[in-house]
Amino acid sequence: MANPFSKGWKYMMSSFDKKIDDNADPKVQIHQAAEAAREQHRQIQEQAAAVIGNRNQLEMSLSRLQKERDKLTANTRAAVQQADAARAAGDAAKAQELEHTAEIFASQLVSIETEIDQTTEMHGQAVRAAEEAQQQAKRSQVEYEQIKTQIRELESQADQAKMQETTSRTLDGLQGAASNPNVPTLDGVREKIESRYANALGAQELAANSHTGRMAEIEASGADARADARLAEIRAQMAAESGGNELGKGSAGELEAGDDAAADVDDADVTLEEPGDAGTKGKPGV
């Protein structure tokens, strides 16, 4: 049976980790991933360098052993030649001593050749390991360059996302300010005005269709008819008065014309008498 305390602890830690991941800054996580990729690439490069360094060290050891082998070979040959010469000269003791020296050189030569064989085998393995390390280092370099490109893209996307979040928060703030319940909106005012206007039209329509409304309409029609009749009567009176005035003006004009004609006749008589008076005046004694 599972330990409930251990299970609860694991659940709590998992939940805690999830909350951290959900609330973490993406750029911080990108930086962490970049540091991990950089560290992995560094370790691969160091390991490849160590493998290649081991190969180089074995090459140097092999070169040194080969030189030592050549030297021991030359010394062994020289000791054998000197022993043969001493033996030919009849110096058996010196010849024996040189033979012993040649044997020592030969023993050292065998040891060096054995070491050379081992070093040569190790060098072959080191060469193959170095080639693999170089290939792995190249792959790591390519992957690291790709990772750096992805990191730059992710950082750019994170910046864009942050700007978008800022813009969204700004728009949300504007919408919140626009939807303040303490401030009337134009749509709300328009709706109230249209509602009141529609209600007024409805009340007017009901009043027009009611009995009282029809009576008022009939009375209004009768009042309009009486007003039209009275207006027509006034116009007739005015027309009659206007006609009488024209007739009076015509009679007065005829009378004035007669008086003028009489005056003209009197003036003519006076004119006719003036010559007679002149003739009478011209006769003496009349």
Image (cartoon, rainbow, N blue to C red):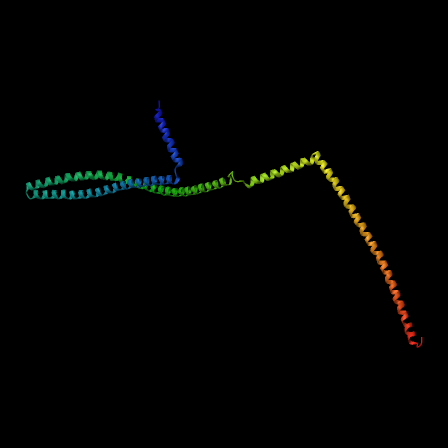
Of 82 and 278, nearer the camera is: 278
Classify residue 264 by image quadrant.
bottom right
The image position of residue 263, as x and y in percent, is 87, 64
Of 106 and 262, nearer the camera is: 262
Residue under the point 90% across and 70% down: 273
Residue under the point 23% across and 42% down: 57
The image position of residue 102, as x and y in percent, is 12, 41
**Side (left or right) of 192 relative to 163:** right
**Which residue in the rendered view is the most extreme toward the right?**
286
Residue under the point 92% across and 74% down: 280
Say above or below: 274 vs 90: below
**Which residue in the rendered view is the most extreme toward the bottom?**
284
**Side (left or right) of 68 relative to 211:** left
Of 192 and 139, nearer the camera is: 192
Residue under the point 84% across and 57% down: 252
Classify residue 210 by image quadrant.
top right
**Side (left or right) of 101 relative to 143:** left
**Side (left or right) of 244 relative to 202:** right
The image position of residue 246, as x and y in percent, is 82, 54
Of 160 and 59, nearer the camera is: 160
Q: Tell me the quarter of the image containing the C terminus.
A: bottom right
Q: Tell me the quarter of the image containing the N terminus.
A: top left
Number of numbered tags placed on the structure image: 0
The image position of residue 278, as x and y in percent, is 90, 74
Classify residue 44 by image quadrant.
top left
**Which residue in the rendered view is the most extreme toward the front?**
285
